[in-house]
Amino acid sequence: SMGERLWGCPLSQNVVGILCLISVAAALDFKYHHAEELEAYLKSVHAAYPSLTHLHSIGRSVEGRNLWVLVLGRFPTHHKIGIPEFKYVANMHGDETVGREILLHLIDFLVTSYGRDPVITRLLNNTRVHIMPTMNPDGFEATKVPDCYYSRGRYNKNGEDLNRNFPDAFESNNASIQPETRAVMNWIKNETFVLSANLHGGALVASYTFDNVTGSSKGYSRSPDDDVFIHLAKTYSFNHASMYKGTGCDNRQTFPEGITNGYSWYQLEGGMQDYNYVWGQCFEITLELSCCKYPPADQLEKFWRDNKVALIEYIKQVHLGVKGQVTDKNGDPIPNAIVEAKGRPHVCPYRTNQLGEYFLLLLPGTYVINATVPGFKSLLKTVEIPDTTGNFSALKQDFSFPEVSVRSRAASCPKIPLYQELEWASAAVKPTLHHILVLMTVLLVIFQ
């Protein structure tokens, strides 16, 4: 069995040890891996590559299954200054299974290529990659009869759709937050994620934020970073075997270039990608990877081949734009400083982490970066951003506040929907007294 082949590994030495590593790679075949097999595989990879990987559970499902994450990188156990965090999450709808399996093959490809393939080696030396093959293990196990279409396995054990379960930026989402959702929210809060994708099935398209909208939009819900999102979605679709063709899954639905704004496709409330962008400071897109939600296992090898290049090229995009540290007069990091590119304000302003770091995904061009510590004069720097993905490092731009020697206090972003209140700012209408009061309230909350 796979287990016996693998668990023999650590005892062997030298030549046998090398053979053993090969058997780990060979042990991953193109079939569906249920909870026990998935766990055994992840543990075997970590045992074979202990310095390149870190395996941990970020929480448990309703039925008590671990939500496993395998982290890969030069420093897998913890965040290092200047190295951005990236994540892939699959199988949040338990009956959408292709992503779950291709992420296992991505893990296999990354660990076996590291040290041999110069691109993968540089990628993992300069990026911390987090891979969660299943966010909804209960739903996967509950799907007894694989089907191309909707089944109850979509939901978690409590019958909740996890992709309608996050706080929403546009309207109050009063869904009761599920253990799987809570685990992911805490994970986002505890890591400096910069870029992410969540893998679904049932269509063939790369969909990007926003998924929800307030009343005034006409068929498109545009975020302040719409250009970056279009680039990210196209990066995936054009590196995929066929997604870019935009033929969709049937004649009714076509997606030019294989991408779509989420809301333009269909509106949803409480989605994970909007939550990542608004509250997690993490750009996330939703990848629909198969017309059939739960295809026969003999198609998995083709799905892996179709997605392999796109999965790697997408990770590289975490190195777009500009990054740096904000420090005080003593050179100590300032957490919770606001760092934004002028002209693209986030309603929850993007802030530095505990190490004073910021990461802003921006396409090549000229930008003014504004660093603000509440109570002090903002620092503005004009930067010329080249295409940095090939260097595996965003442009570096630090900020030093000469008169500050205090750590700014933790700043919380309101957990209530905000975008609707700020719509007037972009809608070129005269602000009413109500709008001005709302804006003042929002600013007080942000800066208090």
Image (cartoon, helix red, strand yellow):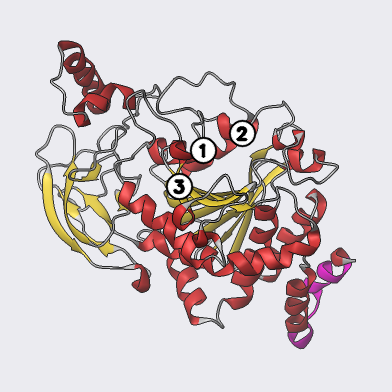
The local crowd at label 3, few if under 14, some if 14 to 19, many if 20 or more residues have their Cα within 10 Å, is many
| Quadrant of the image containing the N terminus | bottom right
* Tag of residue 162: 2
For the residue labelled by badge 1, is the local secondary structure a helix, a strand or a loop? helix
Which residue: 26% across, 54% down?
Answer: 325
Mark 1 Cα-neighbour bin, 10 Å: few <14, some 14–19, many ≥20 = many
Residue 433, percent across and down?
A: 15, 11
Disc 3 marks a residue whose amino acid type is Thr
Question: What secondary structure predominates along the stretch shown in magenta?
Answer: helix
Judge depth for marks 2 and 3 and give the one in front: 3
- Between residues 162 and 189, which one lies in front from this camera angle? 162
Gap between marks 2 and 3 measured at Cα: 21 Å
- Check if mark 2's residue and mark 1's residue have beta carbons within 8 Å: yes
Q: Are marks 1 and 3 in contact (CB under 8 Å)?
A: no
Residue 221 shows in the view: yes
Asked if residue 198 lies left or right of residue 217, the reply is: right
Residue at screen point 80% across, 51% down: 34
- Disc number at residue 272? 1
Magenta highlight on residue 41: no
Q: Disc 1 marks which amino acid?
A: Met
Instruction: Give the quarter of the image for residue 425.
Output: top left
